[in-house]
Image (spheres, rainbow, N blue to C red):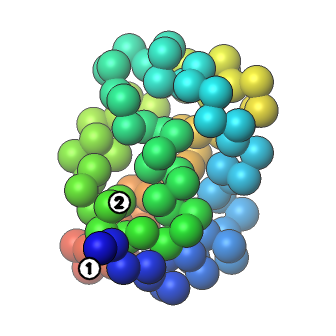
Amino acid sequence: MPKVSPKLASAVKCSDEFNAEACMHCGICTAVCPMGYEILPRKLFRYVQIGLEDKVREHVSDIYSCLLCGMCAENCPAKVNIADNVRFLRKYINENEFNLS
């Protein structure tokens, strides 16, 4: 059973860089992704919002493989800035998983 990480949930709530609350889980982002990711960003952002850090860690390779091309954000009807959210996750992982500042 996944554990909830208060640290991750708190980091997201305190950040101006992560804005997935408006996500409607419509799937347009995954439909237009040139990398063909099924997880990014819909499920991944939900894991982040509720603090399921172990589930986020399972997708570290996807997070770093994202091209940050912006196709997802450009087509998002809720105007979620998905590339910025992925950048936030990379920064969080760098600091908390790899101890990089």
Mark nearer the viewer, 2 or 1:
2
Q: Which residue is mark 1?
A: 99
**Disc marking residue 56:** 2
Amino acid bearing label 1: Asn
Q: Residue at x 22, y 46 (%)?
A: 61
**Disc marking residue 31:** none
- Whether residue 92 appears in this view of the structure is yes
Looking at the image, residue 65 lies above or below residue 86: above
2 or 1: tag closer to the N-terminus? 2
Q: Quadrant of residue 33?
A: top left
Amino acid bearing label 2: Val
Per the model, the C-alpha gap separating discs 2 and 1 is 17 Å
Looking at the image, residue 48 lies above or below residue 82: below
Quarter of the image where the C terminus is located: bottom left
- Farthest residue, direction front: 1
Q: Secondary structure at mark 1?
A: loop
Residue 45 place in picture, x, y as percent: 52, 51
Q: Residue at x 50, y 62 (%)?
A: 48
Q: Nearer the viewer, residue 26 or 60?
A: 26
Quarter of the image where the N terminus is located: bottom left
Relative to 60, is 51 on the left or the right?
right
Q: Residue at x 44, y 81 (%)?
A: 5
Q: Residue at x 33, y 72 (%)?
A: 2
Q: Nearer the viewer, residue 35 or 45?
A: 45
